[in-house]
Image (cartoon, rainbow, N blue to C red):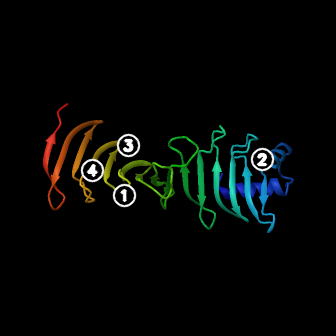
Amino acid sequence: MSIRGVFASAVACGVLYAAACSNPETERVKRTTQPTYDKETGRLTQLTYDRNKNGVIDTWTDMDGTRPLRSRIDTDEDGKIDRWEYYDDKGGLAKVGFSRRNDGKPDAWAYAGPDGKLQRVEVSSTSDERKIDRWEYYADGALVRAEEDTNGDGRPDKWETYVAGALETAAFDENGDGKPDRRLTYRGGQLVSIDSEPDANGRFTKHVDVKP
């Protein structure tokens, strides 16, 4: 359910106790939809929610009055947050954070394109959103290319391309000039060639086939 649906449900059943809600459903919503208000201003600051309707709170949403800011979600209810949702000024979903290490800390953030499909994932090896060191780009839900900063200088020095989800090429900047110096090409998961020694225009001048 979207955050708008969450808030509407909370208002309809948790706050107003609408007569249209069945008794068990009303009790569940009352028990799991818990608002927190600022003691000085009375403004809503947090709203909890039972996302999968099993009677357990699994979503905590920071609020600015009626506007959602971000949510922390325990999708598998193991006591560890594994999904983070961030909302724009209109309450729409702006990005989704998740943990590739499954350690309760976000280390990757997914962004959708205008069509609502996954377009980009930004990854931080240090779980710091301010220090992104890998950028992945998707088309129709499939990874098509990636850039990576392997030495932490803030610039990509590794480039990858994918076909049907499989790695096709991996190129490396080995002298720090921001351009590929060596490219590995793969077929069916096997290394098949190595290109190196680029000229002034970036074209590789040395090609070596790798025999299986």
Q: Which residue is mark 3?
A: 165
Mark positioned earlier in the residue sequence (2 or 4) = 2
Marks 4, 1: nearer the viewer: 1
Q: CA distance from mark 3 to mark 1?
A: 28 Å
In the shown orientation, is residue 139 left or right of residue 70?
Answer: left
Circle nearer the N terminus (2, 1):
2
Q: Quadrant of residue 7?
A: bottom right
- Disc 1 residue type? Asp
Residue hosting label 1: 153
Q: Which residue is mark 2?
A: 32
- Screen quadrant of the C terminus: top left
Q: Earlier in the sequence, mark 4 or mark 1?
A: 1
Q: Is residue 7 left or right of residue 76?
A: right
The residue closer to the viewer here, 1 or 155, is 155
Give me the C-alpha separation between circle 3 and circle 2.
40 Å
N-term mark: 3 or 2:
2
User: Which residue is farthest left?
Assistant: 205
Quarter of image, res 54 = top right
Q: What separation in Å lies between label 4 and label 1 (alpha carbons)?
A: 15 Å
Q: Could you tell me which secondary element the residue under label 1 belongs to? A: loop
